[in-house]
Image (tube, rainbow, N blue to C red):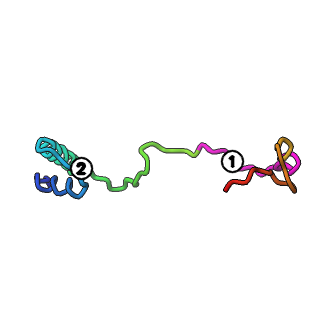
Amino acid sequence: MALSREEVLHVAELARLSLRPEEVELFTRQLNDILAYVQKLEELDTTGVAPLAHVIPLVNAFREDVVREGLSPEAALKNAPAREEGSFLVPRVI
């Protein structure tokens, strides 16, 4: 399936691209090369090959969640410049 010059101009118009004549020829050639490569890939027998999200296996690098004691309210507010009724006191932002 080869793209014509008119089809490339139509796609450029849809994308709101202004192409010079030499760019139209260049993109027509490049897009046709891409389509030819995809068509060649379609010839491969992929029977029994599972779809991939990544080419290499990825492993989650996060640590395990461990439940542990958190800070007490007093420890959390220990270095607070201002506090009120067990909470941080900050300037009003309007």
Q: Specify the label residue 38 is tagged with.
A: 2
Q: Which mark is residue 4?
A: none
| Closest to the observer, 10 or 65 | 10
For residue 47, which quarter of the picture?
bottom left
Which residue is at the front of the view, 27 or 49? 27
> Which quadrant: the C terminus?
bottom right
Residue 66 located within the stretch drawn in magenta: yes
In the image, residue 21 lies at what x, y percent? 11, 44
Q: Residue at left 21%, top 46%? A: 34
From the top left corner, tell me how far across and down residue 46 is, in percent: 31, 53
Q: Position of residue 13 (x, y in %)?
A: 20, 56
- In this figure, which residue is indicated by the disc labeled 1? 64
Give the residue drawn at x 80%, y 49%: 68
Q: Secondary structure at mark 1?
A: loop
Q: Residues within 10 Å of mark 1 (few under 14, many from 20)?
A: few
Three-letter residue code for mark 2: Val
| Residue that appears at 67% across and 44% down | 63
Dot 2 alpha-carbon crowd within 10 angstroms: few under 14, some 14 to 19, many 20 or more: few
Span highlighted in magenta in the image: 61-76
Label 1 amino acid? Glu
Question: Most prominent secondary structure in the magenta stretch?
Answer: loop
Q: How far is disc 2 from disc 1 in space, using C-alphas?
A: 42 Å
Q: Residue 83 in the image: x percent, y percent?
A: 84, 50
Q: Nearer the viewer, residue 8 or 40?
A: 8
Q: Indicate which disc, 2 or 1, sits on the residue closer to the N terminus.
A: 2
Is residue 45 depicted above or below 55 in this figure? Answer: below
Q: Is residue 12 magenta?
A: no
Task: Work out whether 51 lies above or below 20.
Answer: below
Instruction: Quarter of the image for the N terminus: give it.
Output: bottom left
Q: Is residue 21 left or right of residue 14?
A: left
What element does badge 2 sit on?
helix
Residue at x-position 40% and y-position 54%: 50
